[in-house]
Image (cartoon, rainbow, N blue to C red):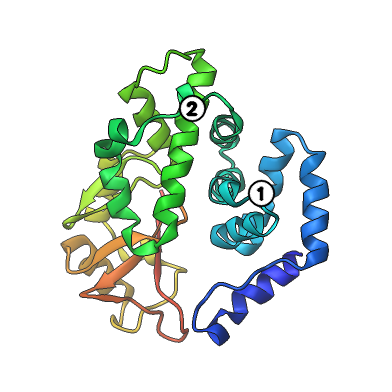
Amino acid sequence: MYQRGEIARKSESLSDGRMMNPLSRADIASLNGILAQSTPEEVSDYAGRMVSNMGEDRTALAFDQIGMTKAGAVLGVVGNLSMQGHDEAAGLVLSGFQSDDDTIIPKKADYIEEIQGVKQAFALLGGIAENREKAIKSAYAGIMIRDGDYSGVYDSDSMEEAIDIVVGEPLEYRGSFIMSPNFDTSADDLEDWLDDLSADDLHGLGSSKLYDHDRDLADAIADGDVTLTETGVRGEYYVINGFNFLQKKDEEQPFILKYNR
């Protein structure tokens, strides 16, 4: 199944970039059987391994294929958190998603202003923004379960925690938003890192087509000559020059800046 996921990933260029179904009928039957007998912890671990191999979008699509349409988006995020070692966060999202208590699910009218930075940060990634919103709602419900709060009264502090669990703290950067790279790094820490970015921070990421030297790209990022946007993986950012994604010099793929502190 994992091998077919990789084939689907590589075949997208043959289908005008449209995502291909990663599972065969046999895979669907197998995955259904596994999930039916799995604990929440095992579901989280399994989704994490799927994300590691196929990416979050294809993992969500895989769950869609087995009839878990509403679950796909959330389990893709659960898998992403699990893959990065954030098991407690993954557990909160999963427990909130699995709850049948509608009173602990936040209403959009209550939280819409608080997630504007998140929606802007992921605006270029299509369905990923919607997936994050669904996961944030599940994380909020998970926090309510953890704290034993079934009152149904909206709590902005819990929503702030849910946002941080799923995507991190929003940083307004060059007129848009990006998210802090991990649980231990604040938006201020990320901004300081970007302001002080050096060629050493770009070592091993691959050179870009537009800049001859890593130090030139580092200066462009630090000086705000380019901007950043989310890739969907926490702590990794696309670099945008004007309206174009910066490309690697010798590869047909975008350059990705990775937080390394």
Camera-side residue: 172 or 56? 56
The total of numbered circles placed on residues is 2
Calculate the distance from the C-alpha at mark 2 to the C-alpha at mark 1: 20 Å
Residue 22 can be seen in this image: yes
Left or right: residue 104 compared with residue 240: right
Left or right: residue 130 compared with residue 12: left
Q: Which residue is mark 2?
A: 141
Residue 192: x, y in percent?
24, 47
Q: Residue at x 38, y 41 (%)?
A: 168
| On screen, residue 109 above or below 2 | above
Amino acid on which the number 2 mark rests in the picture: Ala
Number of residues whose C-alpha sits closer than 10 Å to that of mark 1, classed few (under 14), some (14–19) or many (20 or more): many
Which of the numbered marks, if any, corresponds to residue 47?
1
Q: Secondary structure at mark 2?
A: helix
Rendered image quadrant of residue 256: bottom left
Residue 19: x, y in percent?
55, 72
Camera-side residue: 180 or 71? 71
Residue 183 can be seen in this image: no
Rendered image quadrant of residue 214: bottom left
Residue 117: x, y in percent?
27, 46
Q: Residue at x 61, y 73 (%)?
A: 20
Left or right: residue 32 compared with residue 96: right
Amino acid on which the number 1 mark rests in the picture: Ala
Q: Secondary structure at mark 1?
A: helix
Rendered image quadrant of residue 254: bottom left
Q: Residue at x 25, y 41 (%)?
A: 188
Which of the two marks, 2 or 1, is nearer to us in this view? 2
Camera-side residue: 191 or 197? 191
Number of residues whose C-alpha sits closer than 10 Å to that of mark 2, classed few (under 14), some (14–19) or many (20 or more): many
Q: Which numbered disc flags the more N-terminal residue, 2 or 1?
A: 1
Camera-side residue: 183 or 244? 244
